[in-house]
Image (spheres, rainbow, N blue to C red):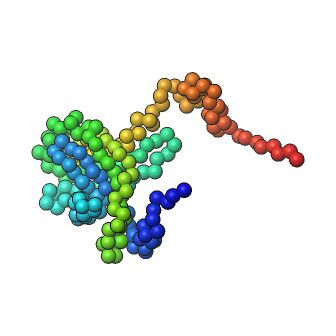
Amino acid sequence: MASLFSEEDLAFLRRPHIARAWFADLDLSSGRWRLHNGVGRKTVGGVEWRGVSDPAGGQLVSINAVEDPRFGQAAKVDIVLSGVNIEFLRSVKDQGREMEGGLADIYWCAFDQETQEVWSSGLKKMFPGYLSSPKIRWSGIGARTVSFTIESLWHSQNFPFGGKWNPADQRARFAGDKGLDFVGVKVQEVIRA
């Protein structure tokens, strides 16, 4: 089986000060946003990506880590904008439905924190996704946040396709499949000589 990483990649990733960063490429109604969960601006793959803080706009953007999905759950990422002004909130409310379903791809890349060297292999795509409808939250007089989720294209597979996850419904979906007959059942193996 061929390795996903070259020997050069592995040597870089073994350095003592390597850090991973998440990248989100968002296709919004206002244009394309390219964000990363680091600080400042980074050029990776010939494209400039904005860090989590945007001092000029006075907004703080947080991108949570990509969660390892459990069985029956697809990967997702939450992005939160805080410190937004009332004009921005109005634009989100007006354009929220247009944003929903917009394309959003999630990538990762590694950096050497000591030298700021970017991994020569560049971005690695984690999953293609789409945007959920934005959620506006108010907390007190001045605390306002806008959040949305990037769901993988396979997110809808989290929901059962008719029926429950039990042996009978599994056989209804796939005739003769006995896989769920053994879930949660103690199995005793008898070896005879």
Question: In the shown orientation, is residue 6 left or right of residue 22?
Answer: right
Residue beneath the point at 34% across and 54% down: 107
Residue 46, given in percent of the width and then of the height, sits at 24, 61
Q: Quick one: 21 or 81, which is closer to the camera?
A: 21
Residue beneath the point at 23% across and 39% down: 99
In the current view of this chain or complex, which residue is farthest to the front?
2
In the current view of this chain or complex, which residue is farthest to the right?
193
Question: In the shown orientation, is residue 33 left or right of residue 127?
Answer: left
- Whether residue 140 appears in this view of the structure is no
Quarter residue 48 falls in: bottom left
Question: In the shown orientation, is residue 183 left or right of residue 82?
Answer: right
Residue 47, given in percent of the width and then of the height, sits at 23, 59
Count the labels in the image: 0
Q: Quick one: 14 or 144, which is closer to the camera?
A: 14
Residue 141, given in percent of the width and then of the height, sits at 18, 48
- Image vertical order of residue 116 relative to residue 31, above or below: below
- Whether residue 20 appears in this view of the structure is yes
User: The N terminus is located in which quarter?
Assistant: bottom right
- Image vertical order of residue 104 relative to residue 113, above or below: above
Residue beneath the point at 82% across and 45% down: 191
In the current view of this chain or complex, which residue is farthest to the top?
172
- Image vertical order of residue 130 relative to residue 11, above or below: above
Residue 82, given in percent of the width and then of the height, sits at 22, 52
Residue beneath the point at 51% across and 58% down: 2
